[in-house]
Image (cartoon, rainbow, N blue to C red):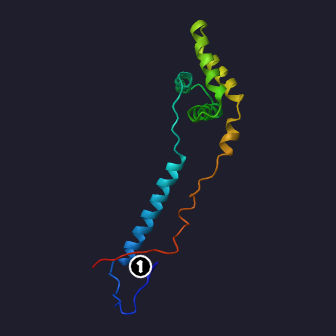
Amino acid sequence: EEIYRANKEEKSVSLTDNHHTQVEQAITLFKQQLEVEKQAERTVVINNSPAEKVANSYLEAIISLQLASKEEQELLLLTKEALNLGRFQKLSKEISKLQKGLKKVSMPSAKQLDAMIAIAKKYPLKESEDKQEPDKTENNNKFVPEIIISESFT
């Protein structure tokens, strides 16, 4: 704390012309660093099992067919997110089982989509989306530091 105290003998110097601009740049940099930290907190590294990889690629194929309605498409995307985050253990197994069953019995694309939707509806995908914790620093624009330690050079 001693470093932040000014000696009475120390002479004051007027601020440089661009001091306020520099402080604004520092605040902007501070907010950017908060965003980076927020993203680092949310980053999850998951190594997918072979069943999850099969399920994910099959789900991608179903999504790319673009046969689903808007609501079904949203459900499929939530399913994909749940797979990638490993939310439900049995989800990837069920999708893999469906995909492996297609090797034995041929099924039209529309029926495959229906089967995938039926699997997805078994899981509370929308509920888990709603219950996600809010971003801890979502109010970055409102957050302004009370103390800004700055140094200006002439």
Q: Where 5 falls versus 54 (above or below)?
A: below
Hey, which quadrant is residue 75 in on the image? top right
Q: Nearer the viewer, residue 147 or 106?
A: 147
Q: Is residue 90 left or right of residue 147?
A: right
Instruction: Write the residue at 46% across / 74% down.
Output: 148
Instruction: Write the residue at 53% across / 41% down.
Output: 44
Hey, which quadrant is residue 62 in on the image? top right
Q: Is residue 38 left or right of residue 78?
A: left
Residue denoted by label 1: 3
* Residue closest to the far bottom: 9
Q: Quadrant of the C terminus?
A: bottom left
Q: Where 83 falls versus 93 (above or below)?
A: below
Q: Is residue 42 left or right of residue 12?
A: right
Q: Where 51 falls versus 7 (above or below)?
A: above
Residue 101 location, x and y as percent?
61, 11
Hey, which quadrant is residue 137 in on the image? bottom right
- In the rendered image, is residue 52 in sight? yes
